[in-house]
Amino acid sequence: MLLAGPVGWLLVAYLGSLAVLFVASLWQLDDFSGEIVRDPGLQNFKELIETPVYRDIVLRTVLIAALVTLTDAILAFPIAFYMAKVASPRMRALLVVAVLMPLWSSYLVKVYSWRIMLQNEGVVNWALDPFGLSGPGFGDVATWLVFSYLWLPFMVLPIYAGLERIPNSMLDASGDLGGRPWMTFRRVVLPLALPAVVAGSIFTFSLTLGDYIAPTLVSSTQFIGNVVYSNVGVANNLPLASAFATVPVAIMIVYLLIARRLGAFESL
Amino acid sequence: MHVSPGTRWFLRIGTAVTLAFIYIPLIVILIYAFNESRSQAWPIDGLTLEWFDRAVNNPGVRDALWTSLKAALGATAIALLLGTLAAMAVSRYRFFGRETISFLIILPIALPGIVTGMALNATFTQVLEIDLSLFTVIVGHATFCIVVVFNNAVARLRRGGTSLEEASMDLGANSWLTFRHVTFPTLRTALVAGALLAFALSLDEIIVTTFTIGQDQTLPIWIFANYARPNQLPIVNVVGVMVILLSIIPVYLANKLSQDPVGAPTGGAPAAAGAAGARG
């Protein structure tokens, strides 16, 4: 009885909606009237695969998602290792909160702040100017930077948890046997922490695939999310938008299957 | 554990760089909110409180703030009720499909927000044929807020064990009395923490909101509609700081209330994912 409420809610509001999404992706738009015709067919997916622009958009999104994941893993490792193995308990608690708080603070405002910083007369150019350099301006580089910024805490926290589970004695043993820090990192830490990195990458990858806010604010190039957004809002082509929204779902299913093989689910 | 001085310094510098990367944009927007000039060039000319005054008296901002608060309160109320019920069922009873329930509850945050938004949009406009409004926003927010309440409540119930409840039942209390006098008091702070997090999540959500809102504007939607208008920028900066405070203060309070850090990695990854779902 207790369950009837929540389960009913989720079934109706969520699973039902997902089902509608898949069904709607098979509908089509009448070219003349602009009305939605509810005849199931695969032409949206055909359009998606055969239109070069759409193919480029999917490729660009996946490529940036992969770059963001790599960048976050590199940035997250030192701080996660410091938190797990070096910092005092007090310092550790402080750092966990320091990483956690921005995770919950407004996502849109963070993107907006990057827009302000990356603009022509912004902080970034001001800081780089004395070195004779200039910032990336708006574009794919800015998008990569902002995504890496936004999802960084999602990578730090699982890696921190994963490193904490590695016994100190193993690292000491590697050192005692003559392993230099780099060797210990490559041969001991990295293999043991890999599932945690993959767990973090689920977030960084999935979040990049679905986002359209960051590209809208700091770039003029299109991502999967932008296509969905503009087809619902401006073009009013709900079937095509639905078809595009199934792309991240499909990519994520493949990604999750690989992640499971790598043992990432135990690290979630 | 032995760490060589060189490695120790490398780690310290790496930590400092990452922390700077995380906090600089937040500090920059905070400074800009006090910017005297309308121009957004850095460095800023001087400091003023004028824009806070203008923002508070701006009718668009006021409406948006009001809409945001109503949506957050509505979604939190639904999430609180359903999340608690589901948490009690999953941790106190064994039944067919118990594992599936946990998975179902986490699903809305595991998929990108645009999928949730798009799916709800298609359902509301095509199947149910109801107009998008504040109500549909509340429904949308509630689907991903449930998980936050659920996680907090489940963690507390698991830690508490069942012996107190069994004792209460053995002494002749019925289910309702046991819930009211034994279960609820132990759950109370966890529920408040969960509710505060749900409130914070709802308040700064934009993607699901975009797909489920009609003519109204929440604060993030207001920012999104105004960020490209140069003469509105000073007010956008102030609203940005408002949104940061409105979401960070509840999270800070929630952290104080719950015994373990909210969204901390051990067993809290789904909570962190809660933030993820609301964002992505």
Image (cartoon, coloured by chain):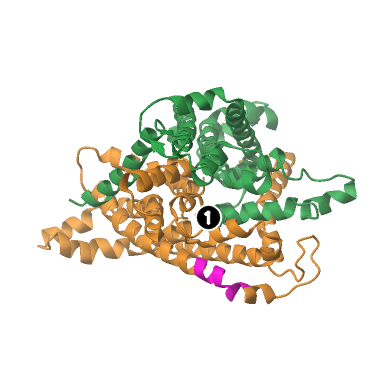
Chain colours: A green, B orange
Query: Label 1 is found on which chain of the structure?
Result: A
The spot of residue B178 in percent (x, y) is: 18, 62
Image quadrant occupied by the C terminus of chain A: top left
Seen from the viewer's position, the closer of residues B242 and B210 is B210
Seen from the viewer's position, the closer of residues B248 and B131 is B131
| Dominant secondary structure, magenta | helix
Give me the residue at 39% from left, 46% from top.
B120
Farthest left residue in view: B172
On screen, residue B270 versus residue A216, left or right, reads left
Residue A158 in view: no
Give me the residue at 79% from left, 60% from top.
B41
On screen, residue B16 versus residue A153, left or right, reads right
The spot of residue B137 in percent (x, y) is: 41, 56
Magenta highlight range: B55-64
What type is the residue that disc 1 sits on? Trp
Q: Considering only vertical position in the picture, is B11 above or below A111?
A: above
